[in-house]
Amino acid sequence: MILTSRRQAFIAITAGLFSWAGIQTPAQALDAPQGRVILTITGKIGETNAERQAQFDLAMLEALPQHSFVTQTPWENGSIKFTGPLLRDVLAAVKAQGTQLKATALNDYRIVIPVDDDRRFDIVLAHRMNDQLIPVRTRGPLFIIYPFDSRKELRSNTYYERSIWQLKSLDID
């Protein structure tokens, strides 16, 4: 085992001591991203991997359980397959504790998404459209997308506006 930081060494030693004493240890903190950071989460979170924030690269998001659905959107012709982790799984990974998500795109577009949406709908933090990584020029690298075709209530401006593309950050409030 190669330890790359004092924090990792401390966690390993502490976990070893707790294990030796028969004490349960808390879940390990998020690993540090190895690739380019494409999502930063701040605010009311319990897990971090940088100073007061959680940073994710693509590999970290792909390591979470992946979900896909096919839906029509008001921005494209025909149905599109979206793939990525459920937003609720990303929030669980950082132990988010809040009532709203303040989402920001690369162009600084901002939208507030109630956390309740995450409980009610299978929202995907998509990194793929039709099995292809989403480039920035076509709404990537990340796209919060609702399964519009699954429920009539989702086919409204309220949910279309919450489907933010070119997502770069979430602030949990």
Image (tube, helix red, strand yellow):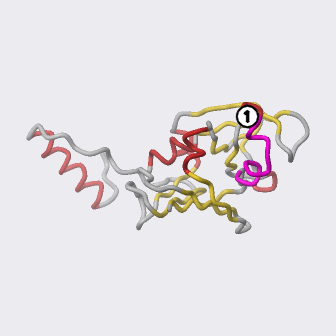
**Image side of residue 26 versus residue 123, left or right:** left
Image coordinates for residue 47, horizontal then vertical, percent: 39, 54
Task: Determine the image quadrant of residue 6.
Answer: bottom left
**Helix, strand or loop: magenta stretch:** helix
Q: Residues within 10 Å of mark 1 (few under 14, many from 20)?
A: few
Q: Position of residue 39 (x, y in %)?
A: 58, 56
Vertical side of 43 occupied by 157: above or below: above
| Relative depth, front residue between 45 and 121 | 121
Residue 11 colored in magenta in the image: no
Decide if residue 73 is on the left or right side of residue 92: right
Identify which residue is drawn at 10% across, 39% down: 20
Q: Indicate yes or no whether the magenta region holds residue 161.
A: yes
The quarter of the picture where the N terminus appears is top left
Residue depicted at x 38% and y 55% = 46
State the image coordinates of residue 168 (x, y, percent, origin top left). 63, 60
Element type at marker 1? loop
Q: Please give the name of the residue rendered at 70% of the width and 64% of the height, measured from the top-left corner.
A: 106
Chain part drawn in magenta: 152-162
Query: Residue 104: which quarter of the image?
Result: bottom right
Q: Residue at 18% of width from left, 50% of height from top?
A: 13
Name the foreground residue: 139 vs 20: 139
- Which residue has dot 1 on it? 131
Indicate the amino acid at tag 1: Asp
Residue furthest to the front in view is 153
Res 86 → quadrant: top right
Compared to residue 129, the image places residue 167 above or below, namely: below
Q: Where's residue 151, x and y in %?
A: 73, 33
Q: Is residue 149 left or right of residue 12?
A: right
